[in-house]
Image (tube, helix red, strand yellow):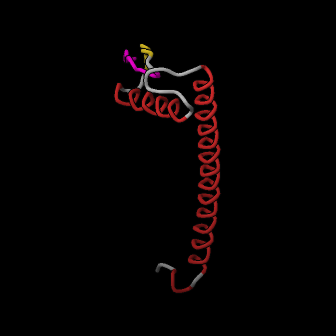
Amino acid sequence: MANRVTIQIAGQQYTMLADESVEYMNEVAELAQQTVVECGGSTAFASTRALALATVNLADEYIKAKTAAETAEAKCRALEAENTALRQQVNRNSAGHPGNRHK
């Protein structure tokens, strides 16, 4: 169910519908506000330039995080495949060892 959330960024209020919690959306708004301030805006006002720079900075962070997550997922899949291959090798070696045969 969508939550109606009112957030404030650079002195402007925005009412949004979000599937995420109010707390989460407030955290998102706080990050956006911090980024606007870092780019030359303030908590009360931001120029189009500051808003554009904030958008570019957030998009840059998003793309880098997405790329890092994709790389981590690929490494995880490779390690899972290696783990499976090693388990199969251990099982084959154990089955062929005379001391491991069940009577």
In which quadrant is the N terminus drawn?
top left
Residue pictured at 57% horizontal, 67% vertical: 87
Q: Is residue 78 above or below residue 47?
A: below
Residue pictured at 65% horizontal, 57% vertical: 78
Residue at the bottom extreme? 99
Bounds of the magenta segment: 1-10
Our reading of the magenta stretch's main secondary structure is strand
Q: Nearer the viewer, residue 46 or 56?
A: 46
| Lateral position of residue 6 relative to residue 53, left or right | left
| Lateral position of residue 57 relative to residue 9, left or right | right
Residue 16 spot, x, y in % from top left: 44, 15
Q: Is residue 2 above or below residue 103?
A: above
Residue 3 spot, x, y in % from top left: 37, 18
Q: Is residue 64 magenta?
A: no
| Lateral position of residue 99 relative to residue 49, left or right | left
Q: Is residue 80 above or below residue 31?
A: below
Residue pictured at 62% horizontal, 48% vertical: 68
Residue 70 spot, x, y in % from top left: 63, 45
Q: Quadrant of residue 27?
A: top left
Residue pictured at 56% horizontal, 85% vertical: 98
Q: Is residue 2 magenta?
A: yes
Q: How many marks?
A: 0
Residue 32 spot, x, y in % from top left: 49, 30
Q: Is residue 45 above or below residue 39?
A: above
Q: Nearer the viewer, residue 67 or 10?
A: 10
Q: Nearer the viewer, residue 13 or 96?
A: 13
